[in-house]
Image (cartoon, grey):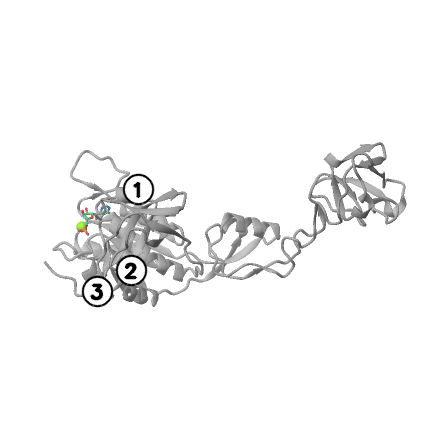
Amino acid sequence: MKLFRKLIPLDEALKTVLSYAKPTEIEEIGFDDALSRVLAEDVCSPIDSPPFDRAAMDGYAIRGEDSFGASPNNPVLLRRRSRGEGEKKNEIMEGEKNYLPIQTGMPMPKGSNAVVMLEYAKEREDTLEVFKPVTPGKNVSFKGEDVKKGEEVLKEGRLLKSHDLGMLASLFKSSVKVYKRAKFGIISTGDELLDPKEYFEGEKKIADVNSYVLAALTKKNASPYIIGIVRDDYEEIKNAISLSLEEGCDGLLISGGSSVGKRDFIADVVEDLGKLMFHGVSIRPGEPTGFGVINNKPVFVLPGYPVATMSAFELLVRPFLYAVHGVKEERKKILAIASKKIPSAVGRTDFVRVKLLCAENGYYAEPIRVSGSGILSSMTKSDGFVVIEENKEGVEEGERIALNIYD
Ligand code: AMP
Ligand code: MG
Protein backbone atom coordinates (compact mmCIF):
# COMPACT_ATOMS: atom_id res chain seq x y z
CA MET A 1 0.00 0.00 0.00
CA LYS A 2 1.22 3.50 -0.93
CA LEU A 3 1.44 5.99 1.90
CA PHE A 4 0.48 9.63 1.82
CA ARG A 5 3.51 11.54 0.71
CA LYS A 6 2.90 13.92 3.57
CA LEU A 7 -0.07 14.88 5.73
CA ILE A 8 -0.21 18.65 5.83
CA PRO A 9 -2.01 20.71 8.47
CA LEU A 10 -5.38 22.17 7.60
CA ASP A 11 -4.22 25.80 7.68
CA GLU A 12 -1.50 25.06 5.17
CA ALA A 13 -3.97 23.23 2.91
CA LEU A 14 -6.38 26.11 3.22
CA LYS A 15 -3.71 28.65 2.35
CA THR A 16 -2.79 26.72 -0.79
CA VAL A 17 -6.41 26.29 -1.84
CA LEU A 18 -7.23 29.97 -1.28
CA SER A 19 -4.22 31.09 -3.29
CA TYR A 20 -6.02 29.62 -6.33
CA ALA A 21 -9.35 31.29 -5.61
CA LYS A 22 -9.84 33.61 -8.55
CA PRO A 23 -12.89 35.83 -8.05
CA THR A 24 -15.67 35.37 -10.59
CA GLU A 25 -16.91 38.15 -12.84
CA ILE A 26 -19.72 40.49 -11.93
CA GLU A 27 -23.16 40.41 -13.52
CA GLU A 28 -26.26 42.53 -13.06
CA ILE A 29 -29.50 40.68 -12.35
CA GLY A 30 -33.04 41.47 -11.25
CA PHE A 31 -33.27 41.90 -7.48
CA ASP A 32 -35.91 39.18 -7.36
CA ASP A 33 -33.43 36.63 -8.73
CA ALA A 34 -30.74 37.57 -6.25
CA LEU A 35 -31.62 35.35 -3.28
CA SER A 36 -28.43 33.71 -1.88
CA ARG A 37 -26.29 35.55 -4.43
CA VAL A 38 -23.33 37.63 -3.28
CA LEU A 39 -23.62 41.36 -3.67
CA ALA A 40 -20.84 42.87 -5.79
CA GLU A 41 -21.62 46.51 -4.97
CA ASP A 42 -22.39 48.64 -1.93
CA VAL A 43 -26.05 49.52 -2.18
CA CYS A 44 -26.89 53.08 -1.14
CA SER A 45 -30.48 54.14 -1.10
CA PRO A 46 -31.50 56.24 -4.11
CA ILE A 47 -34.50 57.58 -2.17
CA ASP A 48 -35.81 58.37 1.27
CA SER A 49 -37.88 55.51 2.65
CA PRO A 50 -40.66 55.99 3.30
CA PRO A 51 -40.66 58.57 0.52
CA PHE A 52 -43.16 60.85 2.34
CA ASP A 53 -44.58 61.30 5.84
CA ARG A 54 -47.30 58.71 6.16
CA ALA A 55 -49.89 57.61 8.66
CA ALA A 56 -48.86 54.64 10.78
CA MET A 57 -52.44 54.04 12.01
CA ASP A 58 -56.00 54.35 10.84
CA GLY A 59 -57.65 57.38 12.35
CA TYR A 60 -57.62 61.16 11.97
CA ALA A 61 -54.76 63.42 10.92
CA ILE A 62 -54.55 66.48 13.16
CA ARG A 63 -52.09 68.92 14.63
CA GLY A 64 -51.16 67.16 17.87
CA GLU A 65 -51.23 70.50 19.70
CA ASP A 66 -54.96 70.78 18.96
CA SER A 67 -55.70 67.69 21.05
CA PHE A 68 -53.98 68.84 24.23
CA GLY A 69 -56.22 68.68 27.25
CA ALA A 70 -58.59 66.10 25.75
CA SER A 71 -60.08 63.49 28.06
CA PRO A 72 -63.06 61.09 27.94
CA ASN A 73 -65.18 63.50 30.00
CA ASN A 74 -63.91 66.57 28.31
CA PRO A 75 -63.30 65.74 24.63
CA VAL A 76 -61.68 68.27 22.35
CA LEU A 77 -63.82 69.10 19.33
CA LEU A 78 -62.22 69.40 15.89
CA ARG A 79 -63.73 70.44 12.56
CA ARG A 80 -63.34 68.43 9.41
CA ARG A 81 -61.39 70.15 6.69
CA SER A 82 -63.39 69.43 3.57
CA ARG A 83 -64.23 70.17 0.00
CA GLY A 84 -65.11 73.64 -0.99
CA GLU A 85 -62.29 75.12 1.00
CA GLY A 86 -60.25 76.07 -2.02
CA GLU A 87 -56.74 75.00 -2.78
CA LYS A 88 -56.05 74.30 0.83
CA LYS A 89 -58.92 71.85 1.25
CA ASN A 90 -56.48 69.07 2.16
CA GLU A 91 -54.46 71.16 4.53
CA ILE A 92 -54.77 71.23 8.29
CA MET A 93 -54.70 74.90 9.20
CA GLU A 94 -52.98 76.16 12.31
CA GLY A 95 -55.42 77.77 14.70
CA GLU A 96 -58.47 76.25 13.00
CA LYS A 97 -58.59 72.95 14.89
CA ASN A 98 -59.00 70.85 11.75
CA TYR A 99 -58.90 67.12 11.17
CA LEU A 100 -59.00 64.79 8.16
CA PRO A 101 -59.76 61.05 8.22
CA ILE A 102 -56.73 58.97 7.23
CA GLN A 103 -55.77 55.35 6.67
CA THR A 104 -52.50 53.59 7.44
CA GLY A 105 -49.88 54.31 4.77
CA MET A 106 -51.59 57.40 3.34
CA PRO A 107 -49.59 60.62 3.02
CA MET A 108 -50.10 62.96 5.97
CA PRO A 109 -52.04 66.06 4.92
CA LYS A 110 -50.01 69.23 4.89
CA GLY A 111 -50.00 70.94 8.28
CA SER A 112 -50.85 67.78 10.23
CA ASN A 113 -48.29 66.11 12.49
CA ALA A 114 -50.10 63.32 14.34
CA VAL A 115 -52.79 60.69 13.96
CA VAL A 116 -55.51 60.13 16.54
CA MET A 117 -56.39 56.47 16.50
CA LEU A 118 -59.99 55.52 15.69
CA GLU A 119 -60.38 54.13 19.20
CA TYR A 120 -59.75 57.50 20.83
CA ALA A 121 -62.13 59.60 18.78
CA LYS A 122 -65.67 59.69 17.56
CA GLU A 123 -66.75 61.40 14.36
CA ARG A 124 -70.25 62.91 14.14
CA GLU A 125 -70.90 64.42 10.76
CA ASP A 126 -68.10 66.95 10.32
CA THR A 127 -67.05 67.11 13.93
CA LEU A 128 -64.56 64.94 15.72
CA GLU A 129 -64.56 64.31 19.44
CA VAL A 130 -61.04 63.45 20.62
CA PHE A 131 -60.84 61.65 23.98
CA LYS A 132 -57.10 61.40 24.39
CA PRO A 133 -54.36 63.85 23.45
CA VAL A 134 -51.64 62.89 20.97
CA THR A 135 -48.22 64.47 20.93
CA PRO A 136 -46.97 65.83 17.60
CA GLY A 137 -45.23 63.00 15.69
CA LYS A 138 -47.43 60.29 17.22
CA ASN A 139 -48.53 57.52 14.84
CA VAL A 140 -46.64 59.02 11.91
CA SER A 141 -43.86 57.36 9.88
CA PHE A 142 -41.69 60.23 8.77
CA LYS A 143 -40.04 60.53 5.40
CA GLY A 144 -36.64 58.78 5.51
CA GLU A 145 -37.38 57.31 8.94
CA ASP A 146 -36.42 53.82 7.76
CA VAL A 147 -33.65 54.67 5.30
CA LYS A 148 -32.29 58.08 4.31
CA LYS A 149 -31.46 58.93 0.73
CA GLY A 150 -27.78 58.08 0.13
CA GLU A 151 -27.52 55.85 3.21
CA GLU A 152 -25.65 52.56 2.76
CA VAL A 153 -28.08 49.71 3.27
CA LEU A 154 -26.25 46.60 2.03
CA LYS A 155 -22.52 45.99 1.75
CA GLU A 156 -20.54 44.35 -1.01
CA GLY A 157 -19.84 40.72 -0.15
CA ARG A 158 -23.18 40.12 1.53
CA LEU A 159 -25.03 36.87 0.91
CA LEU A 160 -28.47 38.19 0.05
CA LYS A 161 -31.30 37.06 2.30
CA SER A 162 -35.04 37.22 1.64
CA HIS A 163 -35.44 40.42 3.66
CA ASP A 164 -32.60 42.00 1.66
CA LEU A 165 -34.70 41.48 -1.46
CA GLY A 166 -37.48 43.23 0.43
CA MET A 167 -35.18 46.16 1.16
CA LEU A 168 -34.12 46.38 -2.50
CA ALA A 169 -37.78 46.30 -3.52
CA SER A 170 -38.66 49.05 -1.05
CA LEU A 171 -36.02 51.29 -2.59
CA PHE A 172 -37.14 50.61 -6.19
CA LYS A 173 -33.69 49.14 -6.81
CA SER A 174 -34.78 46.78 -9.56
CA SER A 175 -31.39 45.29 -10.42
CA VAL A 176 -28.21 44.57 -8.49
CA LYS A 177 -24.62 43.62 -9.26
CA VAL A 178 -23.67 40.18 -8.00
CA TYR A 179 -20.76 37.80 -8.49
CA LYS A 180 -21.30 35.24 -11.22
CA ARG A 181 -21.69 31.66 -10.13
CA ALA A 182 -18.80 29.41 -11.05
CA LYS A 183 -19.73 26.08 -12.59
CA PHE A 184 -18.39 23.17 -10.58
CA GLY A 185 -18.39 19.69 -12.11
CA ILE A 186 -19.03 16.84 -9.69
CA ILE A 187 -17.64 13.38 -10.34
CA SER A 188 -18.10 10.28 -8.18
CA THR A 189 -15.71 7.42 -8.71
CA GLY A 190 -16.06 3.77 -7.74
CA ASP A 191 -16.99 0.45 -9.37
CA GLU A 192 -19.41 -0.26 -6.55
CA LEU A 193 -21.49 2.90 -7.03
CA LEU A 194 -25.02 3.01 -8.39
CA ASP A 195 -27.04 6.15 -9.01
CA PRO A 196 -29.78 6.25 -6.33
CA LYS A 197 -32.31 7.11 -9.02
CA GLU A 198 -31.71 3.72 -10.59
CA TYR A 199 -33.52 0.58 -9.59
CA PHE A 200 -31.76 -1.23 -6.76
CA GLU A 201 -32.07 -4.99 -7.14
CA GLY A 202 -30.30 -5.97 -3.97
CA GLU A 203 -27.00 -6.15 -5.86
CA LYS A 204 -23.76 -5.45 -4.06
CA LYS A 205 -23.99 -1.79 -4.86
CA ILE A 206 -23.57 1.39 -2.86
CA ALA A 207 -25.70 4.42 -3.63
CA ASP A 208 -23.80 7.39 -4.98
CA VAL A 209 -24.41 9.81 -2.13
CA ASN A 210 -21.58 12.24 -2.79
CA SER A 211 -22.81 13.54 -6.15
CA TYR A 212 -26.04 14.69 -4.56
CA VAL A 213 -24.60 15.95 -1.28
CA LEU A 214 -21.83 17.88 -3.04
CA ALA A 215 -24.32 19.32 -5.53
CA ALA A 216 -26.59 20.43 -2.69
CA LEU A 217 -23.71 21.98 -0.74
CA THR A 218 -22.26 23.66 -3.82
CA LYS A 219 -25.60 25.04 -4.93
CA LYS A 220 -25.54 27.59 -2.11
CA ASN A 221 -22.75 29.52 -3.82
CA ALA A 222 -21.92 28.02 -7.18
CA SER A 223 -23.63 26.17 -9.99
CA PRO A 224 -23.13 22.45 -9.57
CA TYR A 225 -23.04 20.18 -12.58
CA ILE A 226 -23.35 16.48 -11.81
CA ILE A 227 -21.20 14.54 -14.26
CA GLY A 228 -22.03 11.20 -12.67
CA ILE A 229 -20.28 7.98 -11.74
CA VAL A 230 -16.97 7.01 -13.28
CA ARG A 231 -15.48 3.54 -12.84
CA ASP A 232 -12.17 2.92 -11.07
CA ASP A 233 -10.23 3.03 -14.31
CA TYR A 234 -7.28 5.33 -14.86
CA GLU A 235 -8.13 6.20 -18.47
CA GLU A 236 -11.85 6.61 -17.85
CA ILE A 237 -11.15 8.96 -14.96
CA LYS A 238 -8.61 10.89 -17.02
CA ASN A 239 -11.10 11.29 -19.87
CA ALA A 240 -13.90 12.35 -17.56
CA ILE A 241 -11.72 15.04 -15.97
CA SER A 242 -10.38 16.36 -19.28
CA LEU A 243 -13.81 16.44 -20.88
CA SER A 244 -15.45 18.22 -17.94
CA LEU A 245 -12.81 20.92 -17.89
CA GLU A 246 -12.97 21.35 -21.67
CA GLU A 247 -16.75 21.51 -21.53
CA GLY A 248 -16.76 24.64 -19.44
CA CYS A 249 -16.48 23.59 -15.81
CA ASP A 250 -14.58 26.21 -13.82
CA GLY A 251 -13.49 23.59 -11.31
CA LEU A 252 -14.11 20.01 -10.22
CA LEU A 253 -15.06 18.13 -7.09
CA ILE A 254 -14.09 14.49 -7.44
CA SER A 255 -14.84 11.99 -4.70
CA GLY A 256 -13.72 8.43 -4.06
CA GLY A 257 -10.45 6.80 -5.07
CA SER A 258 -8.62 9.53 -3.25
CA SER A 259 -6.80 7.35 -0.78
CA VAL A 260 -3.64 5.36 -1.28
CA GLY A 261 -5.12 1.94 -2.17
CA LYS A 262 -4.41 0.00 -5.38
CA ARG A 263 -7.53 1.32 -7.06
CA ASP A 264 -7.17 4.91 -5.90
CA PHE A 265 -6.09 6.78 -8.99
CA ILE A 266 -7.44 10.28 -8.65
CA ALA A 267 -4.37 11.96 -7.22
CA ASP A 268 -2.19 10.32 -9.88
CA VAL A 269 -4.52 11.40 -12.69
CA VAL A 270 -4.53 14.99 -11.42
CA GLU A 271 -0.73 14.94 -11.29
CA ASP A 272 -0.72 13.48 -14.80
CA LEU A 273 -3.00 16.19 -16.24
CA GLY A 274 -1.78 19.12 -14.19
CA LYS A 275 -0.22 19.64 -10.81
CA LEU A 276 -1.19 18.07 -7.52
CA MET A 277 -0.55 20.71 -4.87
CA PHE A 278 -1.11 18.45 -1.87
CA HIS A 279 -2.54 15.05 -1.03
CA GLY A 280 -3.36 14.10 2.53
CA VAL A 281 -4.54 16.61 5.10
CA SER A 282 -4.44 16.19 8.84
CA ILE A 283 -8.21 16.36 9.35
CA ARG A 284 -10.59 13.77 10.70
CA PRO A 285 -12.62 12.63 8.97
CA GLY A 286 -11.25 13.53 5.56
CA GLU A 287 -7.56 12.67 5.64
CA PRO A 288 -7.46 11.48 2.01
CA THR A 289 -8.15 14.94 0.64
CA GLY A 290 -6.11 16.51 -2.10
CA PHE A 291 -6.06 19.52 -4.33
CA GLY A 292 -4.63 20.10 -7.74
CA VAL A 293 -4.70 22.54 -10.60
CA ILE A 294 -5.33 21.52 -14.19
CA ASN A 295 -5.25 24.21 -16.90
CA ASN A 296 -5.47 26.83 -14.17
CA LYS A 297 -8.65 25.26 -12.83
CA PRO A 298 -9.05 23.99 -9.27
CA VAL A 299 -9.64 20.29 -8.77
CA PHE A 300 -10.59 18.97 -5.35
CA VAL A 301 -9.80 15.35 -4.64
CA LEU A 302 -12.26 14.32 -1.95
CA PRO A 303 -12.64 11.19 0.17
CA GLY A 304 -15.15 8.49 -0.78
CA TYR A 305 -16.93 8.20 2.54
CA PRO A 306 -19.74 10.75 2.49
CA VAL A 307 -19.08 12.11 5.99
CA ALA A 308 -15.41 12.54 5.15
CA THR A 309 -16.36 14.32 1.93
CA MET A 310 -18.68 16.66 3.85
CA SER A 311 -15.96 17.33 6.41
CA ALA A 312 -13.46 18.17 3.65
CA PHE A 313 -16.12 20.31 1.98
CA GLU A 314 -16.78 22.36 5.10
CA LEU A 315 -13.11 22.75 5.97
CA LEU A 316 -11.68 23.43 2.50
CA VAL A 317 -14.19 23.67 -0.32
CA ARG A 318 -16.64 26.06 1.32
CA PRO A 319 -13.95 28.63 2.19
CA PHE A 320 -12.74 28.33 -1.40
CA LEU A 321 -16.26 28.87 -2.81
CA TYR A 322 -16.73 31.84 -0.48
CA ALA A 323 -13.48 33.38 -1.73
CA VAL A 324 -14.31 32.74 -5.39
CA HIS A 325 -17.76 34.26 -5.03
CA GLY A 326 -16.66 37.24 -2.95
CA VAL A 327 -18.55 36.29 0.23
CA LYS A 328 -17.41 38.66 2.95
CA GLU A 329 -19.59 37.54 5.80
CA GLU A 330 -18.68 35.03 8.43
CA ARG A 331 -20.79 32.00 8.99
CA LYS A 332 -22.74 32.66 12.18
CA LYS A 333 -21.84 30.35 15.04
CA ILE A 334 -23.50 29.42 18.30
CA LEU A 335 -21.43 29.33 21.45
CA ALA A 336 -22.43 26.16 23.29
CA ILE A 337 -21.24 24.25 26.32
CA ALA A 338 -19.72 20.82 25.62
CA SER A 339 -21.94 18.30 27.40
CA LYS A 340 -19.13 15.72 27.34
CA LYS A 341 -15.41 15.58 26.87
CA ILE A 342 -14.48 15.45 23.17
CA PRO A 343 -11.10 13.84 22.61
CA SER A 344 -8.82 14.93 19.79
CA ALA A 345 -5.13 14.55 19.05
CA VAL A 346 -2.77 17.49 18.87
CA GLY A 347 -1.69 17.95 15.26
CA ARG A 348 -5.06 17.00 13.82
CA THR A 349 -8.19 19.05 13.12
CA ASP A 350 -11.43 17.29 14.00
CA PHE A 351 -14.84 17.81 12.44
CA VAL A 352 -17.16 16.73 15.24
CA ARG A 353 -20.86 16.25 14.66
CA VAL A 354 -22.93 17.53 17.57
CA LYS A 355 -26.50 17.78 18.64
CA LEU A 356 -27.63 21.15 19.92
CA LEU A 357 -29.55 20.96 23.18
CA CYS A 358 -31.31 23.94 24.64
CA ALA A 359 -31.29 24.18 28.44
CA GLU A 360 -32.27 26.93 30.87
CA ASN A 361 -28.72 28.19 31.20
CA GLY A 362 -27.97 28.13 27.47
CA TYR A 363 -27.05 25.82 24.64
CA TYR A 364 -25.26 22.51 25.00
CA ALA A 365 -23.35 20.68 22.29
CA GLU A 366 -23.60 16.94 22.57
CA PRO A 367 -21.15 14.99 20.41
CA ILE A 368 -22.63 12.12 18.45
CA ARG A 369 -21.26 8.84 19.73
CA VAL A 370 -20.91 6.76 16.58
CA SER A 371 -18.89 8.92 14.32
CA GLY A 372 -16.92 6.87 11.78
CA SER A 373 -16.80 8.43 8.34
CA GLY A 374 -19.00 5.61 7.01
CA ILE A 375 -21.78 6.55 9.43
CA LEU A 376 -23.98 8.93 7.49
CA SER A 377 -26.54 8.93 10.29
CA SER A 378 -23.98 10.81 12.43
CA MET A 379 -24.87 13.74 10.20
CA THR A 380 -28.64 13.30 10.21
CA LYS A 381 -28.66 12.85 14.00
CA SER A 382 -26.66 16.02 14.56
CA ASP A 383 -27.56 19.68 14.13
CA GLY A 384 -24.15 20.98 13.26
CA PHE A 385 -20.44 20.59 13.69
CA VAL A 386 -17.64 21.83 15.85
CA VAL A 387 -14.11 22.20 14.56
CA ILE A 388 -11.46 21.20 17.07
CA GLU A 389 -8.34 22.96 16.01
CA GLU A 390 -5.06 21.29 15.45
CA ASN A 391 -3.27 22.66 18.50
CA LYS A 392 -6.05 21.56 20.88
CA GLU A 393 -6.04 18.28 22.73
CA GLY A 394 -9.78 17.86 22.70
CA VAL A 395 -12.46 19.76 24.56
CA GLU A 396 -13.28 19.36 28.23
CA GLU A 397 -16.80 18.83 29.49
CA GLY A 398 -18.23 22.25 30.33
CA GLU A 399 -15.95 24.11 27.91
CA ARG A 400 -17.54 26.60 25.55
CA ILE A 401 -17.26 25.73 21.88
CA ALA A 402 -18.37 27.38 18.65
CA LEU A 403 -20.95 25.38 16.79
CA ASN A 404 -21.78 25.73 13.10
CA ILE A 405 -25.35 24.88 12.24
CA TYR A 406 -25.81 22.94 8.99
CA ASP A 407 -27.56 25.00 6.39
P1 AMP B 1 -12.74 5.10 -1.63
O1 AMP B 1 -12.18 6.39 -1.17
O2 AMP B 1 -13.04 5.08 -3.08
O3 AMP B 1 -11.92 3.96 -1.19
O4 AMP B 1 -14.13 4.94 -0.89
C1 AMP B 1 -14.24 4.82 0.51
C2 AMP B 1 -15.62 4.35 0.89
O5 AMP B 1 -16.55 5.34 0.50
C3 AMP B 1 -16.05 3.08 0.20
O6 AMP B 1 -16.77 2.30 1.12
C4 AMP B 1 -16.92 3.55 -0.92
O7 AMP B 1 -17.90 2.61 -1.29
C5 AMP B 1 -17.57 4.79 -0.34
N1 AMP B 1 -17.90 5.74 -1.39
C6 AMP B 1 -17.07 6.17 -2.35
N2 AMP B 1 -17.70 7.04 -3.15
C7 AMP B 1 -18.95 7.16 -2.67
C8 AMP B 1 -20.09 7.91 -3.09
N3 AMP B 1 -20.06 8.70 -4.15
N4 AMP B 1 -21.23 7.79 -2.37
C9 AMP B 1 -21.26 6.97 -1.30
N5 AMP B 1 -20.22 6.26 -0.86
C10 AMP B 1 -19.07 6.34 -1.54
MG1 MG C 1 -13.34 3.65 -4.39
CB within 8 Å, label 3 to label 1 = no
Q: CA distance from mark 3 to mark 1?
A: 35 Å
- The percent position of residue 276, horizontal first and vertical second, equals 23, 65
Name the outermost residue toward the top.
124
Give the crowd class for mark 3: few <14, some 14-19, many >=20 residues within 10 Å. Answer: some
Q: Of the two numbered discs 3 and 1 on the same chain, state the one appearing first in sequence.
A: 3
**Quarter holding the N terminus?**
bottom left
Q: Is residue 12 above or below residue 283?
A: below
Residue 110 appears in view? yes
The image's mark for residue 389 is 2
- The percent position of residue 34, horizontal first and vertical second, equals 50, 51
Say which amino acid is labelled 1: Thr
85 relative to 285 in the view: left or right: right
Say which amino acid is labelled 3: Glu
Give the crowd class for mark 2: few <14, some 14-19, many >=20 residues within 10 Å. Answer: some
User: Circle 1 sits on which residue?
Assistant: 380
Asked if the residue at label 2 sits under 8 Å from ligand 1, the reply is no
Q: Of the two numbered discs 2 and 3 on the same chain, state the one appearing first in sequence.
A: 3
Name the outermost residue toward the left.
1
- The percent position of residue 60, horizontal first and vertical second, equals 77, 40
Q: Residue at x 40, y 46 (%)?
A: 361
- Which image quadrant is residue 206 in? top left
Tag count: 3
Q: CA distance from mark 1 to mark 2?
A: 23 Å
The image's mark for residue 75 is none
Q: Of the two numbered discs 1 and 2 on the same chain, state the one appearing first in sequence.
A: 1
Query: Element type at marker 2?
Result: loop
User: Circle 3 sits on which residue?
Assistant: 271
Query: Element type at marker 3?
Result: helix
